[in-house]
Image (tube, grey):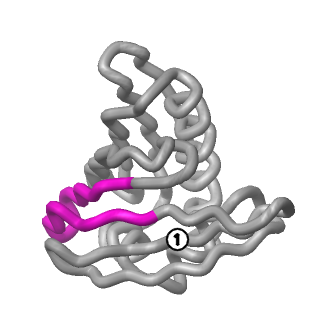
Amino acid sequence: MTPAQTTVASEGGKIVVKRTIPATVDELFDAWLDPESLAQWMRPGTDALSTATVDARVGGTFEVVMHYPDGPKRHHGEYRVIDRNRKLVFTWISDATHHAETLVTVDFHPALSSTEIVLTHERMPDHEAALSHSHGWTAALQLLETLLAR
């Protein structure tokens, strides 16, 4: 198991999160587009729950509602690219982006018995949003790895 490597770039409001997960590219790609799976790993911490809806097609939308102690937080966007087992590109709008439309690209790089995920989140409105999302994506990928290890 390789720990996540996270870099936060302040120029251009971009973060990059990389993690190698011992799972097939099929399992990982599907986990991003299946609402039940998405709700299990894209959540705030290990105790709080999320709900998710997904229309997995280019132009389709998704919504993840993370349930925090102080109330639900909605994250939503539209799929721009769905290239099976290679790449997902989608917009991302949330309270943490100040409701500005940001762009997430997830690249999948299969290896021998694992897959490297390279997540690039661009158009961050400020350093605070970049830092918040850096922590959030790192935690989400860690939860995804835990889920798939079961």
Amino acid type, callout 1? Val
8 lies above or below 116: above
The residue stretch that appears in magenta? 76-92
Instruction: Residue 122: say if magenta.
Output: no
Q: Is residue 1 visible?
A: no
Please tell me whether the stretch drawn in magenta is mainly helix, strand or loop.
Answer: strand
Q: Secondary structure at mark 1?
A: strand
Question: Number of callouts in the render?
Answer: 1
**Relative to 24, 110 lies left or right:** left
Q: Nearer the viewer, residue 100 or 138?
A: 100
Residue 104: x and y, percent? 32, 48
Residue at the disc numbered 1: 64
Residue 125: x and y, percent? 42, 30
Q: Answer few, some or many: residues within 10 Å of disc 1's Cα (few below 14, many 20 plus, some between 14 and 19).
A: many
Residue 119: x and y, percent? 37, 44
15 lies above or below 144: above
Q: Is residue 55 visible?
A: yes
Q: Nearer the viewer, residue 79 or 24?
A: 79
Residue 18: x and y, percent? 43, 38
41 lies above or below 123: below
Q: Nearer the viewer, residue 88 or 53?
A: 53
User: Most extreme residue toward the top, as rendered?
Assistant: 11
Identify which residue is drawn at 60% across, 46% down: 136
**Relative to 60, 42 lies left or right:** right
139 lies above or below 149: above
Identify which residue is drawn at 27% across, 48% down: 105
Identify which residue is drawn at 16% across, 73% down: 59
Image quadrant assignment for residue 55: bottom left
Q: Quadrant of the C terminus?
A: bottom right
Identify which residue is drawn at 52% across, 79% down: 52
